[in-house]
Structures are given as structure tokens and as C-alpha cells.
Image (cartoon, rainbow, N blue to C red):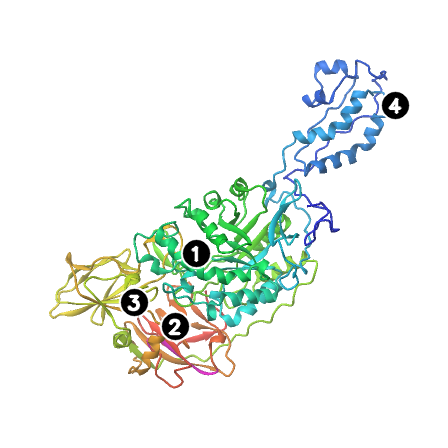
Amino acid sequence: MPENQGWGRRPGAPAAGHRVLPEPGGGVRPPPPLPDTHPQCPAPSLGSRTERLSPASMLRSPGPGPAQKSRLCRGPTPWLRPLKRPRHRFAALGAWWGQHLPLVTVLLSPSSPCLSWKRMVGVFFLPFILPAFAPRFKQEGSLMLGTAHPPQPRFNWSHLTPLELKNRSVGLGTASTGRGKPHFTLEGHRFLICGGSIHYFRVPREYWRDRLLKLRACGFNTVTTYVPWNLHEPERGKFDFSGNLDLEAFVLMAAEIGLWVILRPGPYICSEMDLGGLPSWLLQDPRLLLRTTNKGFTEAVEKYFDHLIPRVIPLQYRQGGPVIAVQVENEYGSFNKDKTYMPYLHKALLRRGIVELLLTSDGEKNVLSGHTKGVLAAINLQKVQRNTFNQLHKVQRDKPLLVMEYWVGWFDRWGDKHHVKDAKEVEHAVSEFIKYEISFNVYMFHGGTNFGFMNGATNFGKHTGIVTSYDYDAVLTEAGDYTEKYFKLQKLLESVSATPLPQVPKLTPKAVYPPMRPSLYLPLWDALSYLNEPVRSHQPVNMENLPINNGSGQSYGFVLYEKSICSGGRLCAHAHDMAQVFLDETMIGILNENNQDLHIPELKDCRYLRILVENQGRVNFSWQIQNEQKGITGSVSINNSSLEGFTIYSLEMKMSFFERLRSATWKPVPDSHQGPAFYRGTLKAGPSPKDTFLSLLNWNYGFVFINGRNLGRYWNIGPQQTLYLPGAWLRPEDNEVRHPVSALTSHKLSDQNVILFEKMLSGSDIKSTDKPML
């Protein structure tokens, strides 16, 4: 690219001069001035043997040696110093000649007392020779170290938006200005990706436009999103791209607002989702190896891509859509089980018609094992340090830098602390990205919510579920409100924009509603007859292998294992993740990965042994995803004697179940009830419902459903203490609220549902607040 080409301009268009990134402490270190005369140096004749210093001999030594002194004019003759880390070879030439042109003119003058034709040649070629001995420019040496701060560039992308750019042919690409830094181009125009992550599946569809407008008004030009396979294909061969999962509608809305899109379709996405976004039915066959070229896995991927990619094809840039890039898998460098897997996925996308830029995304230390030939490598990071880009430069030195995930916050886990990140640190990092022309994507710009059972988990010695809120301490809050980070980034991006930013959308209104106290409840045991037909099995069956959902098993929720026993003793069972053990309706203990046995007291009569197991979220990262079957895995024994003949109930908490509960006989809520039960109450939201947060401080553990939608898990161990309730999901008039099983009988039940499922012990009021407690 010509050096006068600016940001957002075609080659050859007039623009400000090309800026070159200097090295730490760098710049051009020119030779000291040469004297134009010296009183001790007589004027020799041309070709005098006392003046035979060639350019090569001048460069062999930093100073005059004894042999040289005999051939030089007497006196303190200066020597040449090598250039130190020039900004650019030709920039060094210009700097040297600009500073020393008057001096050279004097030296070449016929009246110069120290003149020879060889010196004339040496002086002339000196600036061309010296840069070859200087160290080559290394971009990564000065990144983020505060040693050199080039002036902020100004960008004008007003003509580079999905609506304005009509004539399209080459899409997002890469280029380099000779020996300068590589950079991205869009339709031949120099382009810097300023992206922010928003996951459509974590945001109510009614709020997509609001969040995208806020991204655009903050100064960003691109939105990135994952595509969750597990939500789009909940059962084998059964696809869902409707409602809140309407990927195409989200992408087209982004284009309408003026944003480009980078899609991250997996098949694995991590994203703190259950099993990293992979469908749980993949775990049915223990021989199927996830994220490899194992036949069972690739056959499932092929069928999924056959359905997904045709939806993406018309959304691509060259088809007139906003999708400028597509990511191949996600962070495979940290998994790295099959060297042929990434090339396989690369070809699978190309074969189906993906023509836009393809990229990979890995942690800074896993780039070497995660990248694949022919695909742009990008990195994910929390902060930039001296060696951040080392592996990336080993893979590709001729490509522009792209930080695919700059983590502006972090996710929370149950029983852990709420994570925050200083807004000034985020502002500084993004400012540095812009200064050094590093394309970036803020993860997350808006995190949203892990509605329902979609949350994942970690297992670093202990299985720990991700909380319901995916606030992430992001640029926008979980409810889409502005933060200090938003205004700092908006000010920063506005300062480098050649055109005004769009107007900031108004705040989403919040409300505090009157407290509600559930009036009716239904114990879990009374609700069993309203579940689907139970499975009867000789041995316990894990959740994924239950013969339900057209052979796809159960993905989320609870499984209840029931067996009649007539004697007590030492009960042993492998339950994942958390199991409550009951004799009839009385809880006698808890099983989990660290506690796999408990004592059953001696029995006078036969009793029902009931084990209620909850999936608290499958691990979403690392090789452990291979062994994330839920429910009871293996046999159940008492005193080492295996139990046989189980009745297994699936509690998926689907809408069809709540519909059937309409005909159940609900009971008045007692002062206190211990054990799993559904509770029902009514939320009076008025004629114009607004966003709010439900506070369940005196409840213990469970889920809240409102108007058929699962708001997610609450748990008194924190850190999260409130559940986000979008106003768009509330209907005018009364909204019935139910705790797990309590929601299906009162007036207006068909369209004003709120249900709470409490596992442990009933609480009292359910309050609302206009501020979250995370």
C-alpha cells in the first residue's frame, strides 16, 4: 500500500503520511557531525595517499585505529556510529540526510581541506549502507510497554458500513505497506476491526436492537457472536432457529444498524455454556471422541453444518450480507487432541461455500498448537505483556494482529466472588490497541444472562457451576445499562473518529414491584404423576442415555431415581452433579463428586429410596468435557450389594409439564416446608411492565419460571443474589410467579405464569429491586 494511504481510503487516495511504529528507546541515532575544517589538518591534494579511507574501512571499526590514524588527517577525527533501531530503513535515510546535508555539502566542496574522491563516494553511500547493519524493526517489542506512543490515528469508516458499501468483491483481507506493518483491508480500504461480543441467545430478542444500537453508538464497527450447537439442535436432527435463536434475524439487524459481523459457529464454542455448546446427546456413546476426527463426531458435525451453513451463506459479505469473517472452532490449542481436526473443519467450511476470511482464536500460549494452515491466527487475552505476541509472530509475521477476545471482565461461579475489572485498565488497553493499529474484539461488550439451564461449569479439582448472570463486568450490564467502561470507551473511540458517533439510546427503564408471597404450593412427590411416563430399568441410567426425546436423552434439569428398599446400611452411588437422597419424602443426605456414600438407618418397614440428581452445568473447557455424563453413572449399592429395578423420572421443566400441572390440586403454603416443591405467586406488574430484578434472599436454592420462561438458578451461597427479569417477558396485568412446581392453576394462569422450584426449604416474600446484586 502506498505510504500516503490513510484509514478507510483506497490505494492512491490522498491522506496523511504513513505512520511507522518505533522501537523502545528507538528512533534514528545518526553519526555525530563531521567537522568542515580543522586547523591541524593541511589541505591535501586530490588522491593523496593520506586520504584513502573507503566506505568499507569506515564501517569495519567504530573508531580510528593506529593504522588508520597514520592515513588520516591529524586531530580528533570523528567516527561513525551505527544507526540504532531505525523506524524504517528509508525513514532512517531521510533523517540522516536531512540532518547532515549542509555538512556533506561542505565536505564535497572543492575547498574542503579533507577531500578525496573516495571520501565523496563513501559519504554518498553511507546512509544506504548503515541501515543494513541496524537491527530490523520489531513491532512486538514496543507493544503496550509505554516506551513509544505514536499519535492517535483518525478513522473515517462512514462509507464502510453494510448499508453504504454496495459494490463488493474482495471482502475482508490483509495487506502490507512494503516493510511497514500489515493491516486489514475491507474492499481495498484500510480497516481496523473494532468489535464487541453480544450473544443473541443470552439476550431477549426484544432487546437485540437496543444492545446493537448501544454498540454502534459507542464507536464500534463490528459485532461478534458465537453460535451454540446445543441450543440449535437439542435433539438429533431437530433444529431450532426460531424466536430467541433466530440467528439470521440477529445478523440482518446488525447490518441494518451499520455493524459488520464475525460469526463463531464452533462446533465447540466454550462460552461458559453447558458442554461448551456441544449437544449432550454426543455423550451417549463412550466411543465417540469429542473435538476429533472420530467418525461419530464428524458425522454429527457434518449434519449440523449441512443445516447451519446454508443459513450463513447468504449473510456473507460477498452475498450482500454483513458477515466479514468466520471463526474455525474455538481455542483448540488448549485441547489439541487431533492434528487433523482443525484442517478437517477448515475444509468443511470451504466445501459448503464459506468464502469470507477464516480465522482461529487461541490463548496467547496456545497459538502454535491451535492454528491451521491457510487460516488467520488470532489470540485471546486478559492483558498485554512483553511476550504476548511471540507465538503469534512465529506463526505469521506478515499478517495483521487481531485480538479476538480482550476480556474486559470475567465470569462468576457459585460460591466464588464477583469479578470486576477496573475501567481505566480497559480504557488504557483499548487505547494501546488503537495506537498500534491492532484490531480487537471486546469480550464481552454485553454479556446477558444464562437463562434456563444453559450455564456451564469449571472443574479445577472441584466441579463448580457458572452463575445465572453472565454480566461479566462487561461494557453494558446484564440488563443493558451503561457503565463507566462504556463512557470511557465511547470517549476514546469518538476521539479517533473523523465523523460524529450516533446518538446514545435512552436507558432501559426499571421498576420495583410490590413484594409477593406465594399462596399455593405443590410438593414434588405430588407432581410426579404429571410428568411424562417414567423409565423402568434394571440398572440406573444416566441422563443422556434415557430413552426419551426421540432417542436423544435428557440434556438439562433433574432426574429422580426411585427404588423400594427394605434394609439400611452404607449407600454408595456416583451422582453428578448434586443428589438429594430421601427415604420416602424425608431427606437423609446429599451425594456429589466428593461424597459418594452415606448411611441409611435400619428400616422397620420397606421404604422408597429416592435420589434426586441435578445437572448443575457440564464442564465447558478442557478435556474433561469427554466425561460429563449427568445423573447416576454406574450402579447403586447398599452394603456392596447392587440394587436393581429402578423407576426413573425425567424433570426437564419444559412448558408441556407446566401445562399439565394446571389440573393438579395445589395446597395453601404452610409456614415452612422442607423438601423440593413448586410455589406459585402473582407479580403485579401493571399496564406497562418494565425490567426488574427478583430478590430471593430468604429462599435457598432453585429456579424461577415466569410466563413459561426459565429465568435461571438462584442459590443463597452467592455471589449472585438477584435474578434479572426482562420487562419484555412480562405481560400487562398480573404475572403469576411460581416456585418450582407451583404455577399452573390460578386465574390468568395460561398467560401470566410465574413459578418457583425450591429444592430445600421454603422462604417467604419474593421482592423486586431496580438494581442487581451480583
Residue at which label 3 appears? 548
Q: Would residue 14 be visible to someone looking at this image?
A: yes
Most extreme residue toward the left is 604
Marks 1 and 4, the one that precedes in the sequence: 4
Label 1: element kind: loop
Left or right: 589 in relation to 616 = left
Residue 128 x %, y %: 72, 30
| Circles 2, 4 touching at the beta carbon (< 8 Å) | no
Residue 332 placement, left or right of 552: right
Q: Mark 1 points at which residue?
A: 267
Could you tell me how far apart the alpha carbons at marks 1 and 3 are, in whole angstroms?
24 Å
Q: How crowded is mark 3: few (under 14 residues within 10 Å), some or many (20 or more)?
A: some
Quadrant placement of the C terminus: bottom left
Q: Is residue 229 left or right of residue 387?
A: left
Query: Which sits earlier in the primary sequence, circle 2 or circle 1?
Result: 1
The kind of residue tagged 1 is Pro
| In the image, residue 734 lies in the stretch drawn in magenta | yes
First to last magenta residue range: 732-741
- Circles 2, 3 touching at the beta carbon (< 8 Å): no
Give the x, y percent position of residue 323.
Answer: 56, 59
Which quarter of the picture shows residue 614? bottom left
Q: Which mark is residue 110?
A: 4
Kindly identify the residue that appears in the image at 54 percent across and 62 percent down: 314
Q: For the residue labelled by badge 2, is the local secondary structure a helix, a strand or a loop?
A: strand
Q: How crowded is mark 1: few (under 14 residues within 10 Å), some or many (20 or more)?
A: many
Q: Nearer the observer, disc 2 or disc 3?
A: 3
Q: Position of residue 73 (x, y in %)?
A: 79, 17
CA gap between label 1 and label 4 equals: 76 Å
Which of these two is toward me, 306 or 357?
306
Please name the residue that numbered disc 2 is placed on.
Answer: 704
- Amino acid type, mark 4: Pro
